[in-house]
Image (cartoon, grey):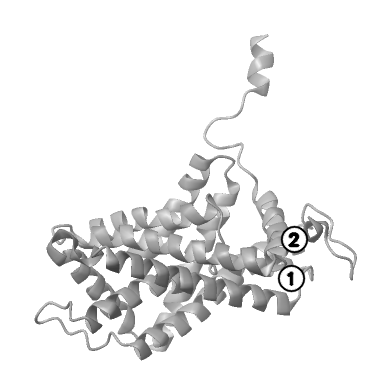
Amino acid sequence: MADEKSAHAPALFGSDAYSPAEIEDKVEKLGVKKARMPFLPELVLSIVAGGSIGIGGMFFCIVLGDPTLGYAVQRVMGGVVFALGLALVMIGGAELFTGNCLIVMAWANKQISSLEVLKNWSIVWVGNLIGALGLVFLLWMCHFPDLNGGNVGIGMLKLAIGKLSPDFVTIFFKGIMCNILVCLGVWLAYAGRSVSDKMAGMVLPVAAFVAAGFEHCIANMFFLPMAWLMVETGHVPTGLDVSVITLPSIIHNLIPATLGNIVGGAGFVGAVYWLIYRKGLGGITPLPKQGARSPAAAE
């Protein structure tokens, strides 16, 4: 009897997680659903995601606002708490542009068209921007930058200066590295069968990109407008050069960060895993015949 029970007992240490091939199959099916979601829920879920990533950014800025912390401790700790943003998206349910770069796996199977991919990315990017800016307004009205004697605001200004100073190419490659890590965090979250599994999978990849100072276009939709608002209203300490914090500079950051995020997520994660588990190993679910709508799209 004891042997029979042990044979059916769940294995320890997460070995009951979805396999990489099962994750690839899940991402393909989700890609079809995401690409064909009706406009209104897609937009609202995108707004929720922009605000959610902003909440993670808010948490990160509280850590930045403690000047007594060493660089590595501050960055790693800040990255861990920033993971709250992705957790709200992945577990609470929302549409995040950087994560949606993985829908290229369904596109590679010709289950969705290029137009559907671009439509999804455009709606989600704009919705994320609305959500991030909405959170900027709410936190501004809460006097969030004034926390810790204004040190939180100073930390945000210095963060923005660091993000706006590099050239286009540098920001682009920082965007690639960022979304490689973000999409790997999403991939590991899909492996989990419980909330705790998903959290454990996504935290370290997110913490790594934050600690390394890579560029996440949606997070920057929160950080940079908040810093710009501080500059425009005169909330700048004496001696800090904030001349780089302008609207043109913010656009200069968001364009290459967005393009880099697409290359990192769609190319270095989505395309690679599709090449391995669908193209190379055949995948799990048979693909629909050419011209037929996939079962996932009909759900």
Amino acid at the residue labelled 2: Arg
Tell me which label, 2 or 1, sits earlier in the chain. 1
Where is residue 8? Give x, y as percent: 67, 22
Q: Which residue, as the protein is rendered here, is positioned at the far left? A: 238
Q: Give the labeled residue for mark 2.
A: 278
How packed mark 2 is, by other alpha carbons closer than 10 Å (few <14, some 14-19, many 20 or more), is many
How packed mark 1 is, by other alpha carbons closer than 10 Å (few <14, some 14-19, many 20 or more), is some
Q: Give the labeled residue for mark 1.
A: 108
Amino acid at the residue labelled 1: Ala
Q: How many marks?
A: 2
Q: Quadrant of residue 77?
A: bottom left
Left or right, residue 263 beside residue 35: left
**197 vs 207: above or below:** above
Where is residue 49? Give x, y as percent: 50, 62
Q: Quadrant of residue 17?
A: top right
Q: Which residue, as the protein is rendered here, is positioned at the far bottom? A: 248
The quadrant of the picture occupied by the C terminus is: bottom right
The quadrant of the picture occupied by the N terminus is: top right
Task: State the residue at coordinates (90%, 65%).
Answer: 289
Where is residue 118? Give x, y as percent: 65, 78
Tell me, yes or no, whether the two marked residues, 2 and 1, touch with CB atoms within 8 Å: yes
